[in-house]
């Protein structure tokens, strides 16, 4: 009797920004015959370059990378859009006997892939612009308070400063009259590959991580981030887009509007990214079955932990 073919695992390298995910993802791909699927909500955008930490061709080491630099910054690209595209790439890579490796720190993207969202209404651009204006004038805290009044259960599952998700929950409520928390039961079934996901989470020491974040953010400004934003705005990209709401870009826009000094823009960007890294780890701690990788700067030690876990998974599924 012919032995039953066992489907290969799908690997995920996640963790906070600046923790070394890119290099480990490439190394894992080289080791198992894999291809990388980007799981970062900023690296998807075309032309948004300096502060996104997109891997260079040298960093890719010849490993195929997918879902990077392919979305127009003015497009309202959602987590559901990414999950659809990522599922297609997983099927495509496995069809040529490759191993999909998801790399990135956007936990909401990963969760949406594993547990698909309900069928949401098409974006009402006028409503979205009104909410963006509230965000510009009164800040993300005001949007969060609005959501807490109309849908406290959804608000309890979101971060106050995650204004993109907060806005989407408000849009669903104002467009349909239904709370997001009440209609999540309409989610589709998980994809067939969900049980094959092996999530690795990089967990570097907080102080070392924050030091690297501060240094890298300053390097982005030294590399011409302000000029890049000027060019993006001149090309017709709206300030209110998700792309220019990313860390660094948002504060440069405020600097260009005369709302803060360059020094303040740098310091606030560093603070934003540090806070984001903290939220990323908090989000990922909610994921069951994750394999946490402590350490920082010692890639060999982290790699050995990954290798050992992979060997164990194969020995349990010969």
Image (cartoon, rainbow, N blue to C red):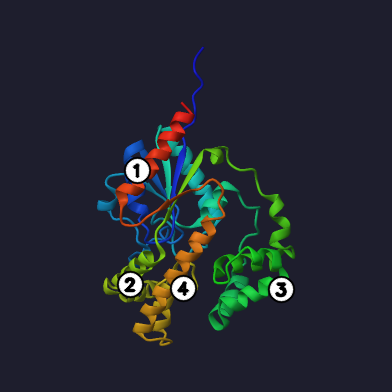
Query: Residues under labels 2 and 3: Cα distance?
Result: 39 Å
Decide: marks 1, 4 in contact (CB < 8 A)?
A: no
Q: Nearer the viewer, mark 1 or mark 4?
A: 1
Decide: marks 2, 1 in contact (CB < 8 A)?
A: no
Residue lying at 48% horizontally and 57% vertically, measured from the top left = 106
Secondary element type, mark 2: helix
The mark nearer the N terminus, 3 or 1, is 3
45 displayed left or right of 299 = right
Residue lying at 54% horizontally and 59% vertically, measured from the top left = 283
The mark nearer the N terminus, 3 or 4, is 3
Q: Residues within 10 Å of mark 2 (few under 14, many from 20)?
A: some
Residue 165 placed where, x, y %?
A: 58, 65
Q: Which mark is residue 19?
A: none
Q: Nearer the viewer, mark 2 or mark 1?
A: 1
Q: Which mark is residue 304?
A: 1
Which residue matches tag 4? 238
Decide: marks 3, 1 in contact (CB < 8 A)?
A: no
Decide: marks 2, 4 in contact (CB < 8 A)?
A: no
Secondary element type, mark 3: helix
Which residue matches tag 3? 149
Q: Residues within 10 Å of mark 1 (few under 14, many from 20)?
A: few
Which residue matches tag 2? 228
Answer whether residue 311 is visible to the viewer in this image.
Answer: yes
């Amino acid at each position: 009797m012919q032995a039953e073919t066992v489907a290969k695992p799908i690997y995920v390298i996640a963790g906070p920004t600046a923790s070394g995910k890119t290099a480990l993802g490439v190394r894992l791909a080289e080791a198992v015959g894999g291809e990388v699927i980007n799981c970062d909500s900023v690296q998807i955008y075309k032309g948004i370059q300096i502060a996104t930490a997109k891997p260079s061709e040298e960093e890719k080491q010849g490993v195929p990378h997918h879902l990077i630099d392919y979305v127009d910054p003015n497009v309202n690209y959602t987590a559901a859009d990414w999950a659809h595209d990522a599922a297609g790439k997983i099927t495509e890579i496995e069809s040529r006997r490759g191993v999909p490796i998801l790399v990135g720190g956007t936990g909401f993207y990963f969760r949406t892939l594993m547990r698909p969202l309900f069928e949401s209404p098409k974006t009402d651009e006028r409503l979205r612009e009104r909410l963006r204006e509230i965000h510009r004038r009164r800040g993300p805290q005001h949007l969060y308070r609005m959501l807490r009044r109309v849908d406290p259960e959804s608000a309890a599952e979101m971060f106050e400063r995650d204004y993109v998700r907060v806005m989407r929950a408000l849009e669903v409520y104002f467009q349909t009259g239904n709370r997001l928390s009440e209609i999540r039961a309409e989610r589709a079934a998980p994809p067939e590959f969900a049980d094959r996901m092996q999530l690795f989470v990089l967990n570097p020491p907080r102080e070392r991580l924050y030091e690297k974040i501060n240094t890298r953010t300053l390097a982005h400004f030294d590399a011409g981030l302000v000029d890049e934003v000027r060019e993006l705005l001149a090309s017709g990209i709206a300030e209110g887009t998700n792309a220019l709401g990313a860390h660094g870009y948002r504060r440069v826009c405020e600097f260009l509007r005369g709302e803060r000094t360059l020094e303040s823009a740098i310091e606030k960007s560093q603070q934003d990214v540090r806070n984001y890294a903290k939220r990323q780890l908090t989000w990922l701690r909610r994921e069951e079955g994750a394999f946490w990788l402590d350490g920082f700067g010692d890639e060999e030690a982290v790699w050995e932990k990954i290798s050992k876990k992979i060997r164990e998974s194969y020995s349990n599924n010969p």
